[in-house]
Image (cartoon, rainbow, N blue to C red):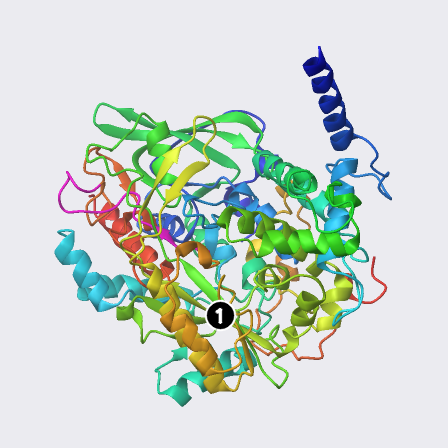
Amino acid sequence: MWISLLGVVALGYAVSRVLLGYPRPPRQMAVLARSEAAFVAGAAEATFPAGGGIPPSGLDADLPGYTDRLMAAAQPRMRLLMHLLFFLIEHATLFFPAPGRGGRRRFSELDLEQRAAVLEGWRTSRLFPRRLVFASLRAILTMGYFGYPAVLRQLGLAPYEIRTPICEVDLWYPRIGASRASIRLTPADLTPPSDGTPIPLDAPLHPAYREGAA
Amino acid sequence: MSAADVDLRVFADYDRDVREEADVVVVGSGPCGAVVAKELTDAGQRVVLLEEGPPFTPADYELDGPFSMARNMREGGLRTTLGTVIPTMQAICLGGGSLVNSAICVRAPDFVLDRWCSDFELPHTRRADLDPHYDAVGAFLGIAPTPENVLGQRNLLFKKGCDALGIPSEPISRNVRGCRGSGECFTGCRSRAKQSMDVSYVPAALRGGAKVLTSVRVEQVLVEGRRATGIAGRVVQPFSGKPSFEVRVRARRVVLAAGCMATPVLLQKSGDLANGSGQVGANLQFHPGVAIVGVFPELVHPQFGATQGYQSLHFLRNGFKLETLWAPPAVLAVRMPGAGLALKQRLALAPHSAVWDAIASCNRSLGSVRARRRGLDPKLTWNFHPDDVPILAHALHTLARIFFAAGAKVVIPGVHGVPEELHSLAEAEILRTRRFRASEFVTASNHAFCTTRMHGDPRRGVVDELGRCHDLDGLYIADTGVFPQCPSVNPMWTGMALAHRTAQHIAAGG
């Protein structure tokens, strides 16, 4: 009787810990669950906090939104692995609590300092699988951070605007998904190939990376 | 020539099952398959070239590295091995890996070819045998050393460091015409300077009359008795891989050039074909690569310059090759150690940083390619042999020396158990003296070989040195899977030279 009751309570706690109490993300996500969006936001803030050498924070860079788009583009098997990765770190604090008061809360509910400490524990672990888990998470977050145009502009690493020469294959290859009948270019549109003139360091940026671009 | 003059099909063009007949069907439009298709078309053969991916136009390129990989790499660019975990990639697009590699062309060194000849009973694969084929490919693609005006500081600092230490180095020869130094080789060359297969060999084959069917996934090699007679497959939607119409191509000869991670799977899925030797899918080798960051007092402007413009071949006999490196910042930044404000501070040094890498020859580290129960993605297993691990440490120590000789103030090795920043040669000594485990390095490799290796003895190899399968008439393999061991240098040109030889043999009626 008591064991059954204990089991029900434990199950209830586990369910509530995994499923309940997550805030609604600022916008609709295609793939990320509400809990995952909260986790990614928490990890993003801990990995790329405000201040420091590059002004935008991980939250400024909308890493949950980037992660959602990346997962939507990923293949199902990889998407599943990412779901598992987020679940693992979000709930591992149940068994390996964060330092300080309330360290047994789920990762996304921890204070910023506690989240940073938890990630540091994964990063510096003597166990390779733990480091691998951290490296996988940080890779996703870092890719998202560097996918944010303001970060690349700040570092002078944003792609340049390049006028692509039009060559013969442009008369043959349509854009992906379109039919060859959609090609409007004619031989009159061909341009000379690249002459090898180096791109100047102060060349204009690609439009998508300019200040004010969406 | 206009679109109507070439026989090319893309996904939107298919409206029914496809039946074709040809002299030769080539599976895979990467560097090796494209060479075979063009050479055989030139020789007057009716050629059908099949590619699972679509053609990418510059408007289809993604500038964001991870999204680029998600679109043009199998498994979204997130493929890894079991055993020792190492990320590896395989492209899925017209032109294969040539669309998204850095165009490095290096001939396999003499000592490698000599070893192939002596250890694998390949008497006609010496330098003098292969040079005419290297030359033919080189002339067609305009392979030449990277011009000085597009090297950029990132590459020139490598030369400076090597010169200071007396280490021979050289500009990398590449299949590029008119490079502008955009450093975008890995996401597709918007300058259209890189002579990837989709703008070089494949168009040449099309002009010559080859039929090129894209968005076709080959699922089976057809066989009658002891002879390959064609292929069967499906039209697949780009990116989703959703299958639709059936495709069957009957041909007198079948050339598999699907890459060393796909060709063995295709053979295994076709009823374990051509595997009397038991070597199909065995012997998987990589060139594990490690990268290291150097921070200079002056601005390096790393985004400008040939993606990989300088190299040193001096240490090949020690088991490694040194190169400069650039990649989408999002991909490179993943290597930076740390978290929080310390990580941001380190990332903020990017404009002052250069990244160099080493690829290692690890002939003792072997793995396998096996078909999964479902689908055509391979199950890769690979184990880093403990005796090969010190090669990486030696290579990183050498790169650190070159960085400091070039004037770097900080070197970031990115190795577990080593300080995150090294400030002097004395501090870098740890890379030379410490005993490392494989798991302490962050490695990756996009060079993979040997899974259908050539060997003079049919009991020990899948193909002979002309690419002919020992067990099956009419079946050839032309990709890096035929290498008997790793080539110690970037494999593309060697693969193309061997494919050129295979094509000549077929054209001669072989």
Magenta residues, start to end: B443-461
Position of residue B167 measured from the top left corner of the image (x, y, whole percent): 35, 83
Q: Residue at x 36, y 66 (%)?
A: B138
- Which amino acid does the dot numbered 1 rest on? Gln
Q: Residue at x 25, y 35 (%)?
A: B474
Judge left or right: residue B439 versus residue A51: left
- Nearer-the-camera pick, A109 or A23: A109
From the image, tell me which residue sits under label 1. B308
Magenta region includes residue B451: yes
Q: Quadrant of residue A19?
A: top right
- Nearer-the-camera pick, B496 or A130: A130
Total numbered labels placed on residues in the image: 1
Position of residue B330 measured from the top left corner of the image (x, y, whole percent): 63, 60
Determine the chain carrying the residue at label 1. B
Magenta region includes residue B326: no
Residue density around tag 1, few if under 14, some if 14–19, many if 20 or more, within 10 Å:
many
Judged from this view, the residue extending furthest toward the front is A2
Judged from this view, the residue extending furthest toward the top is A1
The image shows residue B362, relative to residue B105, as above or below, that is above
Q: Quadrant of residue A186?
A: bottom right
Report whether residue B144 is seen. no
Judged from this view, the residue extending furthest toward the bottom is B164
Judge left or right: residue A144 versus residue B197: right
